[in-house]
Amino acid sequence: MKGFFDMSVKSKTESKEIIICQWKYDAPFAYSITYDEGTVDTIANALPIHEEFGIPGHVNVVVGQLGQKRHAFCSSLNSYFHMGVDELKFLLSKGWGVGNHSWSHYVYPCQPGLNLYREIVWSKYRLEDMLDYPVRIFAIPNDSFNYAPVIDLVKQHYLACVNIEGSPNRDGFDLYNIGNFIMGSGEIPKRPGWPEELKTENLSMEFLFGSWLYETTHLVMWNVPQDHKCVTPEYLVRRFEKLMDISNRKMWAAKPDDIIDYTLLRRSLKIENVRSENGDIIFEVTGDWPVGVINSFLTLRVSGSGFSSTPKIEQRFYGAEEGYDEHNLSYRAHCAIESIVKDGSDWLITMQLAPGRTIRLKQQ
């Protein structure tokens, strides 16, 4: 079986083929869930469910109200409590991500005293200072009318922007206009960007195949208010079970930061000059390094290698002063290789990649 995705970056020689898979581990689709506002019920009611299923989460926080009772302009969720810095650091230690949801959960243009620089820019660096954590994603608050006035500022200071509607995200999606599904335990609101296929009972591999399902909910409570955008713990379990079931537990569940890194790197790198030499397979990694990427692991599908056992990986990279340097990367000992898995006659190799490297696969 070849890779899931015909559109993946590839290069081949004769019957040998190297593909950068669209998603990590050549998963059939990617999945992220975020909790807007970052209220304290997320830790109490959602975190245990995430740990049970092995799904990392993400919170988009209102920076000017950390650790306070919510008092956002015209908000329907006022009086609930936002997490403080210690709670956010705890979630980060659990492998979650944190994004910026503005300083005050602004409403453009009618909010009194509105300062968009403070909402978008100052709040980001204030949050990073408090958390000692890079905040690379901005999430539009309220509704899509808040997108156009700030997107130029967002592009100057963030890697990505999450809008409202439009999920799931298909190949070639705009990282500064990420489609988002507002998920609740009640009925889906009648909006053109949220098709009926996104209902839990309607989710299917056919609909999600090849996509990134980015979805957002808010409060997680048993007596949930506003069930069009908040969920009960029971419903969250049911949704995770459905996603696991339709993907045969093979979906790539990750925090948005990791999926954005993977997408930027996959779009920037190329596999070129694939060739054979004494039974080994050699290829070059070319392209440009995308500024801001932190997680540089990609998955390669290697077809036609003829290797009967786990290949050994060697790579050389070009140093500006000393030319090429040799590095033997044992998959057991070196952190640059996450996994090597046999898939039929192919090998799936998940490893760190960067431009300017020559990689050799050897039969052990």
Image (tube, rainbow, N blue to C red):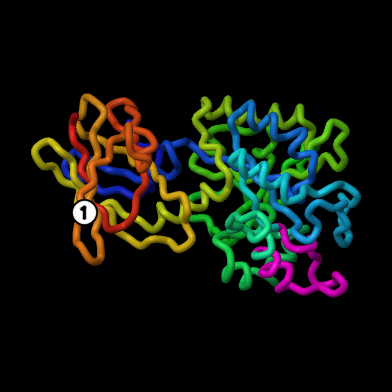
| Magenta portion: prevailing SS class | loop
Asked whether 159 falls inside the magenta stretch, the response is: no
Q: Disc count in the image?
A: 1
> Is residue 71 visible to the viewer in this orientation of the structure?
yes
The residue that appears at 68% across and 52% down in the rendered structure is: 165
Image position of 344 with respect to 180: above or below? above
The residue that appears at 19% across and 57% down in the rendered structure is: 324
Asked whether 102 falls inside the magenta stretch, the response is: yes
> Is residue 190 visible to the viewer in this orientation of the structure?
no
Q: Which residue is mark 1?
A: 325
Q: Which residues are magenta?
A: 101-124
**Disc 1 element:** strand
- Residue 78: horizontal and vertical position, in percent? 89, 52
Q: Nearer the viewer, residue 232 or 49?
A: 49
- Residue 199: horizontal and vertical position, in percent? 69, 36
Q: Nearer the viewer, residue 354 or 161?
A: 354
Q: Quadrant of the N terminus?
A: top left
Q: Nearer the viewer, residue 184 or 195?
A: 184
Q: Quadrant of the C terminus?
A: top left
Q: Label 1 is placed on what type of residue?
A: Asp
Image position of 239 with respect to 198: above or below? above
- Quarter location, residue 160: bottom right
- Quarter location, residue 297: top left
The residue that appears at 79% across and 32% down in the rendered structure is: 232
92 horizontally vs 22: left or right: right
105 horizontally vs 3: left or right: right
141 horizontally vs 287: left or right: right
Q: Residues within 10 Å of mark 1 (few under 14, many from 20)?
A: few
The residue that appears at 78% across and 54% down in the rendered structure is: 66
- Residue 99: horizontal and vertical position, in percent? 65, 54
Image position of 92 with respect to 71: above or below? above
- Residue 76: horizontal and vertical position, in percent? 88, 52
